[in-house]
Amino acid sequence: MLGLKLPTDPRWVNLAEISIEDILTDHAYCEQKAATSCISLISLYPNKAEMVDALAPIVTEEWGHFRMVLKELKSRGLKLGNQRKDEYVNELLKFQKGGGSLESRLLEKLLTFALIEARSCERFRLLSLNISDDNLKEFYHKFMVSEAGHYRLFIDLAKKYGGEEAAMKRWNEYLEFEANLMKQLALRGDRIH
C-alpha cells in the first residue's frame, strides 16, 4: 500500500528497544514537526480551501500524538530529551525541486510529507509487531493506522493540486530517491527515520 521501494532492516526494532527513551523522544519531536508542517501549509496556502479543511484536524491530531508520546515517557519515568537533527527529512528536503512559484512548490511539499508519513507508518508497524513490550505494541499500532491515513491524504492532495499524472511521476522519483537514501543512512535505533 505504501509503495516504499526498500523495507526497513528488521534489526531496527532491536536497536530501538535498546533505549526506549531515545526512540520515544525522537517520536515526540516527529509528531511536533508534523503538526507545525501542517500549520505551515495552511499559512502558505490559505486559498486552497479543501486542503485547509483537510489539514486543520490533522494539526490537532498530530499535537495530540505529541502529547500521547509525552504521557508515555512520563508513565515510564523517562524524560523528553533534546531534539536531534533528522538527516532523513533534511535529505528529502534537499531533493525537493526549488525555485518557481509558491504554487509550483506545493506538489513537492505534499509529496515530501506523504513520504515521511509512509516511512513512519512502516516503522510504527514494525514496532507494533515486533517490539517485546506489549503496551508499546498496542501504542504503536494506533500510530501506524493514523500515519497510513495521513500518507493517503497527502497523496490525494498532491494529485488534486499537482495533477494526477505529474504527481505520480514525481512520487515515483521520490520513492527511488528515498530507497537510495535508506541504503546510505546508518541504521539507528534512536530515530524514527
Image (tube, rainbow, N blue to C red):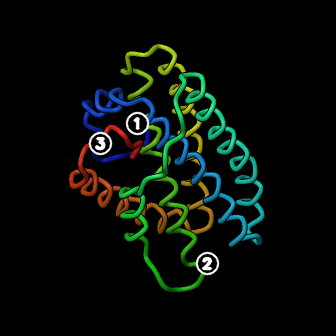
Residue 164 is left or right of residue 170, and the answer is right
Residue 111 percent across, percent down from the top left: 49, 60
Q: In this view, does 14 lie to the left or right of 64?
A: left
> Which quadrant of the figure contains the N terminus?
top left
In percent of width and height, residue 78 lies at 52, 29
Q: Who comes first in sequence, dot 1 or dot 3?
A: 1
Packing grade of label 3 (10 A; few <14, some 14-19, many >=20) is some
Q: Which amino acid does label 1 sit on?
A: Arg
The residue sitting at the bottom extreme is: 100
Marks 3 & 2, CB-CB < 8 Å contact:
no
Q: What element carries label 3?
A: loop
Q: Where is residue 56 in the image (x, y as percent from the top left)?
A: 75, 53
Q: Mark 3 points at which residue?
A: 188
Q: Which residue lies furthest to the top in this view?
A: 134
Q: Which label was assigned to residue 87?
A: none
Number of the front mark, 1 or 2: 1
Residue 33 falls in which quadrant of the image? bottom right
Along the viewing direction, whichever of 65 and 159 lies nearer the viewer: 65
